[in-house]
Image (spheres, rainbow, N blue to C red):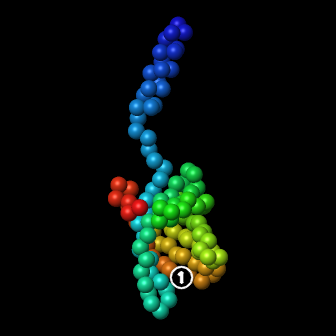
Amino acid sequence: MPRLGAFILVVSASVVLAQPLRSAEVLLSCVWQSLGTSHEKRAFEIVFDQQAQRAELGGKESLPATISDTRISFAVNRGGSIFQYSIDRPSGFGTIRIKDQVLYSGTCKIGDPAHRSF
């Protein structure tokens, strides 16, 4: 009987390894507009992993993030200024703030990871 148990264990392990791995990463493609006088637009991509609580901005940085089913938020230090990103997951609406001032706002949508730009 021990051989049967070992056989079942090996078969079970083979089935688990043969199944495709599902990535916890989700790609968002965002287009946001400045609230300043120039109204410039910025397009960028964010990859986030809810399980690891990490966000990757533009393929360059892996940042600690707070990610729930309803909100994604993280901060980036650029030249001593802390930019705070916040995205509402159900609507895709997001903002970039410095302190209490909103600099950019716009929307994000789920992108195709096969066509990442970075």
Looking at the rendered structure, the number of numbered marks drawn on it comes to: 1
Q: Residue at x 56, y 82 (%)?
A: 102
Residue 108 visible here: no
Outermost residue toward the top? Answer: 1
Outermost residue toward the left? Answer: 115
Q: Quadrant of residue 67?
A: bottom right
Q: Position of residue 55 (x, y in %)?
A: 54, 60
Instruction: Using the image, determine if residue 88 lies above or below residue 3.
Output: below
Left/right placement of residue 96 relative to residue 80 reads: left
Q: Residue at x 53, y 7 (%)?
A: 1
Outermost residue toward the front? Answer: 79
Q: Position of residue 22 (x, y in %)?
A: 44, 44
Element assignment for label 1: strand
Amino acid under disc 1: Leu
Instruction: Using the image, determine if residue 86 lies above or below residue 35.
Output: above
Residue 86 visible here: yes
Instruction: Using the image, determine if residue 48 lies above or below residue 38.
Output: above
Q: Residue at x 56, y 50 (%)?
A: 51
Q: Position of residue 49 (x, y in %)?
A: 52, 54
Q: Nearer the viewer, residue 84 or 4?
A: 84
- Quadrant for the C terminus, please: bottom left
Q: Which residue is mark 1?
A: 103
Q: Quadrant of residue 109?
A: bottom left
Q: Residues within 10 Å of mark 1 (few under 14, many from 20)?
A: some
Q: Nearer the viewer, residue 69 or 50?
A: 50
Q: Quadrant of residue 63?
A: bottom right
Q: Residue at x 55, y 59 (%)?
A: 62
Q: Position of residue 20 (x, y in %)?
A: 40, 38
Outermost residue toward the bottom? Answer: 37
